[in-house]
Image (cartoon, rainbow, N blue to C red):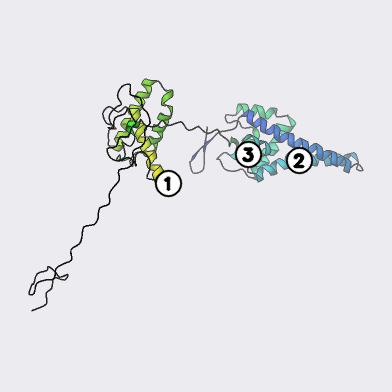
Amino acid sequence: MSALVTGDAVVLGLQPARLPSRALAITIDLAVQWTVFLVASLVLVSATSSLDDAARAAVQVVLFLVVLVGVPIAVETLSHGRSLGKLACGLRVVRDDGGPVRFRHALVRGAMGVVELLLTFGTIACIASLVSERGRRLGDVFAGTLVVRERVPGAKSGYLPPPPPWLAGAFTQLDLSAVPEGLWLAVRQFLSRAGQLDPHVAASMAARLGDDLVRYTGTPAPPGVPAGAYLAAVVHERQTRDARRAFGSSGGPSAGAAPGAPTGGPGYPANPWQQPAPGAQYAPGPIPAPAPQTPQAPAPVSSPEPPAPGATGTQGSGTGFAPPA
């Protein structure tokens, strides 16, 4: 990654294009440009057959400058650094600060490209690109530009293992509001790659991440619960809450089970903190339905009794005042 710094002191993570991809893009551009130049030359030769040799040579020079120099400059300016070859290879020309190029940048690059690419058949451009740390040719150095990659392969999201069935719904009352996003990211990355690590390394990392999580939640893992299972259960609870907030659903394993209902299938105990018995085989069973709640009838409201004649108390009257006898 290239450490490009903008005027606001913001570091941009841009990946510079290297020589193979740039050479392929330039080859595509030159193939299209020379094809257009040859077709236009044949048309002009037949159209200017009545002119003398000097006039035809002047027309050829003008055609060369327009097709091989002017058109690339115009295309790069109007497309903000993307030619046909760069579009096919996923490249773009940007300024050193990451901003879009303008006409003056394209003009300098096009003028230097006549010497670097056309007259020397790309030899100078290849040498300069190999010597430069960021793969720039002389036109980029003088123009203050950089060719970067736009289509960067994204990292595949790792598979997060589900929590053990005997821990499903066990952390519904856990306060997760103080856990920072950086710790969540570290836990998710660990869970997605735990199967690729050495068992001892994975155990130590899980214990360290579990201690960090406990420091923010204030609730330690119950005795006997492995650190990896604790992390998986807490992350699953966080994802369940996010899904409930996003979709307005009250379902899920942590919200639909009645208090005290078994959370695992046959072969697993009803107590969520208890480890399964050695050799027990888990067989998925039906999810218990929520316990029905019988609505209670409201208590009858008795009407207030009228006050006795001569009473001066506050009972029986909404104002606490009794008229004189």
Circle 3 or circle 1, nearest the eye: 1
Q: What residue lies at 65% left-to-right and 33% top-to-bottom? A: 138
Measured along the vertical axis of the image, is residue 268 above or below residue 169?
Answer: above
User: Which is more N-terminal, label 1 or label 3?
Assistant: 3
Q: Nearer the viewer, residue 325 or 285?
A: 285
Left or right: residue 307 compared with residue 106:
left
**Residue 311's x, y, as percent?**
8, 72
Circle 2 or circle 3, nearest the eye: 2
Dividing the picture into quadrants, the one containing residue 150 is top right
**Residue 270's x, y, as percent?**
28, 32
Cα distance between the residues tagged 2 and 1: 56 Å
Left or right: residue 276 compared with residue 4:
left
Q: Residues within 10 Å of mark 2 (few under 14, many from 20)?
A: some
Left or right: residue 307 compared with residue 188:
left
- The secondary structure type at the circle numbered 3 is helix
In the drawing, what numbered circle is on residue 67? 2
Q: What residue lies at 41% left-to-right and 42% top-to-bottom? A: 243
Q: What residue lies at 69% left-to-right and 42% top-to-bottom? A: 73
Kind of residue sitting beneath label 1 = Phe
Query: What residue did someone put label 3 on?
Result: 143
- Outermost residue, right side: 50
**Residue 140's x, y, as percent?**
63, 36
- Outermost residue, bottom side: 325
In the drawing, what numbered circle is on residue 247? 1
Kind of residue sitting beneath label 2 = Val
Measured along the vertical axis of the image, is residue 294 above or below residue 134?
Answer: below
Kind of residue sitting beneath label 3 = Ala
Asked if disc 2 and disc 3 are in contact, CB closer than 8 Å, the reply is no
- The secondary structure type at the circle numbered 2 is helix
